[in-house]
Image (spheres, grey):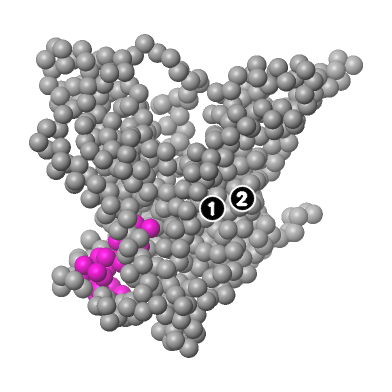
Amino acid sequence: MKVSFKLRSFLKKPQNIILCIMFLFLAYLTLIPMIIMIKDTVTVHASEAMRLKKPIGSFTLNHWFKVLFDKENSWSIFYKPFINSLITSLGACLISLVVGGVYAWLITRTNIKYKKALSTLFIFPYIMPSWTLALAWFNIFKNSLVGGTPGMFASLTGIEPANWFAYGAFPIALVTGLHYAPFAYINIGGILRNMDANLEEAALMLKSTRSRIVRKITIPMVLPAILSTFLLVFSSAMSSFAVPTFLGLPVRYQVLTTQLYRTMNGSQKGQGYAMALIMIIIGVGILAFNQRMTGVRKNYTTITGKSSNIALVNLKKARSVISIIAIILVLIVSVFPLISFALESIILRPGNYSPSNFTLQFWIGTSEQNKIANSEPGILLNPGLWRALWNSIKLSVVCAFSAGTLGFLVGYAIVRARGTKLSTAVDNLAFFPYLMPAMAFSAIYLSMFSVRRGIIPSLYGSFFILVLIGTVKYMPFASRAGINSMMQLSNQIEEAGEIIGVSWWKRMTKLVVPIQKTSVISGYLLPFISCMRELSLFVLLVTPQNRVLTTLLFQYNEKGWSQFSNGINLLIVIIVIFVNTLVNKLTGASIDKGIGG
């Protein structure tokens, strides 16, 4: 009787019902696939049964031996790509921290001009797909030594960029670092803007120099943000697939993600699953270390006794020069890539940038006109591209709705049941997909859903598997937005409605959601934009029937049809920026809220 009463009392609270349902949902879609993938790393697959002389499904450690201990293959399969990943990831961290940190300091702590414009434009590379800068770099600095056609720089100057400059570790680290520099800018700039100015004022009164204040006060204050940014950028760079594909494969510079894609597309899926598991362990370890070092913010302090009169550094005569240099560099990184895509999509013969070589046939040309691209119709007349565009928009809308709704409900339930074991378990499960590299997560779903399991048929090749993996992968964004918004909302508001007999559904639709409208919409916007620009999450799972824009771009790039790949990339960037701007204007929600201005 006592147990029955406790159960009824437990189930009377909507947050407990939500937590129970989401625990089962997330456990099935995160933990079970992980267990199946681990099993696949020690299981004989059909493609290797004859070679290993073992029955399909039997136990084997051959995959792990080939990846880690085989003298002939381990270096090329795992260790060399792993070292390459470390080099490019560490380089990306250094670049993102230096560039993002410098801009954050200039905008928050100096009297630099054009603060609002700098703050807005600096976020652009992060809004755009990660490969945007990679493709722009390739367009500008490719040489005739690799690929046969020179880029813009070689065509205009006659100077062929060296291979190390055009391809490989250097451009991968630079482009990835510039892509994540806005992330460093937001983290570091937020601390600089809100940190107590009394310490700096006291140091100034004691006649300390500006350089000494930066070394002894400013940097130690932002050190937690620097460490957090370093670890998160490192984890993201390690799991990057598109950038190494565009800038590494021309010279066969393999990193873990490109090697994983190559392995999974071959006949060595067991080795691929072993590599995916290693990537997951690395990702989980990095982010667990980050949480241990920086902790988790438990509350929001809105009123403090800090001084708000921050003494800005006077750049004096250098103000105009530094301001102009800063705005030019931002324009080069955020706007010039779009110009390069437009230009590359209208040149008939690559490497020739004279006006006489311009044509619109790759946009509006018929099959007969585009003999150069295997009679592929122009972008705007291409049925395959329109199907891929529709699939991308449909997938992004469905994933945004499902991930946004479920993420908000998870955030609501976690905060309302805060401190319980069930709340903590669901919080960890909801965040778990964020820890896993997208390519490894895709490999997990390929392992679980490519065959029939019980009453669940094979989902491989279906649109539903893309929706499923997108929903689970992007739910952490929406759940974090939901948790943050609910932590700012007092329980008393909802309790008042409950006291007068208002139903839970009405309380949510009439009180909670309207009050936190901006945060809720952000929870939908983040998955939509992430899905529109995603490649590595879907590249292992798509088929010709459910191809999306990003995988179509990847296919055209592999075929060497640069005009089409540049045009599609421009189309994706325009859609992403348009949606972000439209939602921002209509609701105030946006992923590019800067810290300056």
Q: Are marks 2 and 1 in contact (CB under 8 Å)?
A: yes
Judged left or right of residue 55, residue 290 is left
Front one among 26 and 573: 573
Name the spot of residue 298 as percent of width and height, x first.
Answer: 50, 21
The residue at which mark 1 appears reads as 531
Residue 342 spot, x, y in % from top left: 36, 67
Note whether 276 is above or below 593 in the view shown.
below
Instruction: Identify the residue at image location x=34%, y=71%.
Output: 344
Dividing the picture into quadrants, the one containing residue 140 is: bottom left
> 326 left or right of 72?
left
For badge 1, the amino acid type reads: Cys
Q: Which residue extends farthest front?
A: 586
What's drawn in magenta, residue-wise? 132-154
As drawn, the residue found furthest toward the bottom would be 368
Q: Position of residue 301 (x, y in %)?
A: 45, 17
- Residue 427 in view, yes or no: no
* Residue at the disc numbered 2: 399
Residue at the (11%, 32%) spot, across then down: 316
Q: Is residue 150 magenta?
A: yes
Name the image quarter holding residue 119: top left
